[in-house]
């Protein structure tokens, strides 16, 4: 199957052979005109990435005078009309521009340790289409989202970003739940190398629990803050630091608690090491150049799972 820009993709009804759906091909991902195609459907005016099946065929655009009637090397475009050199790729010299859904899919897939190929197999879709979703601003169908949510053990609402303004864990508890302690190694594995955690401190206005972007370097918890901020009150005292994760779809989760003394890092070499190894700048923005380090004296954790597992 080969097409040019402007051709129409027609999907026939297997029962009646009558056109079931058709749309204009507005984007090609291969220079030779082979699938997949970006199609603007005539019934919805939406553009989607299409991998044609056996029930689809191309209705070629009739060329007028001065236009070549044979195959030509097409301009390779995506839905936005920008040049693209590979399936699911990005314009030459430009960084990827994934949409919100693509970022969430990629984040969940990475968290589960799944490759694109494995995730695509679980979701019953082509790996190229999954790459397109993760790397480009796309509008997948509800069916695609349902399949992806099932493959990733999450929900369509979560992939769409629903519930961002409500606290996690509003689902029902497991029928047969169990709470078990995590060993030190399991706790450290869940702390990982970085993330977002909460530091509990005493301030002049009373106790406070503040989220911070943290790094785990040489078994210590380190985070950046401003000298006059609430997290800075941790310096010089024993504090508690907590990280957790809630699996909304499975009504499961875990938490890890670290207790230890906090100090400000002032040695230039140590500060440079922290800056060089930091995975991200603080999400809250602003000037936050004061590094605080928590050296754990106690680390504990708990996990909620199904008793049937």
Image (cartoon, rainbow, N blue to C red):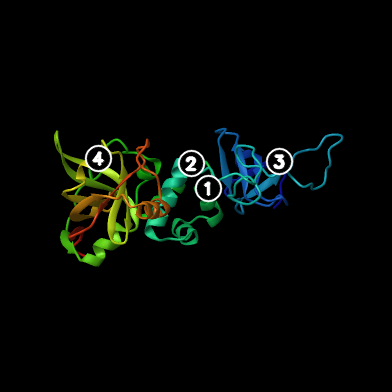
Residues at circles 4 and 1 in contact by the CB criterion of under 8 Å: no
Residue holding disc 2: 99
Marks 3/4: CA–CA distance: 47 Å
Q: Is residue 110 left or right of residue 4?
A: left
User: Disc 4 or 1, which lies upstream in sequence?
Assistant: 1
Marks 1/2: CA–CA distance: 8 Å
**Nearer the observer, disc 3 or disc 4?**
4
**Nearer the observer, disc 2 or disc 3?**
2
Question: Quick one: SS at disc 2?
Answer: loop
**On residue 5, which mark appears?**
3
Marks 4/1: CA–CA distance: 29 Å
Residue at 27% over, 62% down: 188
Residues at circles 1 and 3 in contact by the CB criterion of under 8 Å: no
Camera sees residue 147:
no
Question: Quick one: SS at disc 1?
Answer: helix
User: Disc 2 or 4, which lies upstream in sequence?
Assistant: 2
Q: Residues within 10 Å of mark 2 (few under 14, many from 20)?
A: some
Percent x, y of residue 282: 36, 42
User: Disc 1 or 3, which lies upstream in sequence?
Assistant: 3
Name, please, the residue furthest toward the left. 206
Residue holding disc 1: 135
**On residue 167, which mark appears?**
4
Which image quarter: residue 136?
A: top right
Percent x, y of residue 232: 24, 42
């Amino acid at each position: 199957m080969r097409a040019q820009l402007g051709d129409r993709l027609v999907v026939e009804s297997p029962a009646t052979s009558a056109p079931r759906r058709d749309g204009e091909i507005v984007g090609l991902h291969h220079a030779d005109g082979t699938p997949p195609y970006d199609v603007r459907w005539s019934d919805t005016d939406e553009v989607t990435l299409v991998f044609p099946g056996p029930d689809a065929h191309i209705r070629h655009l009739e060329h007028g005078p001065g236009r070549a009637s044979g195959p030509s090397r097409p301009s390779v475009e995506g839905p936005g009309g920008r040049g693209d050199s590979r399936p699911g790729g990005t314009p030459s010299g430009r960084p990827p521009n994934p949409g919100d859904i693509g970022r969430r899919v990629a984040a969940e897939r990475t968290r589960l340790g799944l490759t694109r190929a494995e995730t695509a197999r679980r979701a019953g879709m082509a790996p190229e289409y999954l790459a397109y979703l993760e790397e480009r601003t796309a509008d997948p169908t509800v069916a695609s989202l349902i399949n992806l949510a099932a493959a990733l053990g999450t929900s369509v609402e979560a992939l769409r970003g629903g519930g961002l303004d409500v606290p996690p864990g509003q689902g029902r508890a497991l029928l047969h739940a169990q709470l078990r302690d995590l060993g030190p190694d399991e706790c450290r594995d869940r702390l990982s190398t970085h993330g977002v955690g909460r530091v509990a401190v005493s301030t002049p206005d009373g106790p406070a629990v503040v989220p911070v972007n943290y790094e785990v370097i040489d078994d210590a918890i380190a985070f950046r803050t401003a000298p006059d901020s609430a997290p800075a009150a941790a310096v010089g005292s024993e504090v508690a630091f907590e990280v957790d994760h809630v699996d909304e779809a499975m009504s499961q989760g875990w938490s890890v608690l670290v207790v230890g003394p906090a100090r400000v890092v002032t040695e230039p070499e140590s500060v440079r090491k922290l800056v060089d190894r930091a995975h991200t700048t603080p999400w809250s923005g602003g000037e936050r150049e004061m590094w605080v380090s928590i050296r754990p004296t106690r680390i504990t954790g708990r996990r909620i799972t199904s008793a049937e597992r």
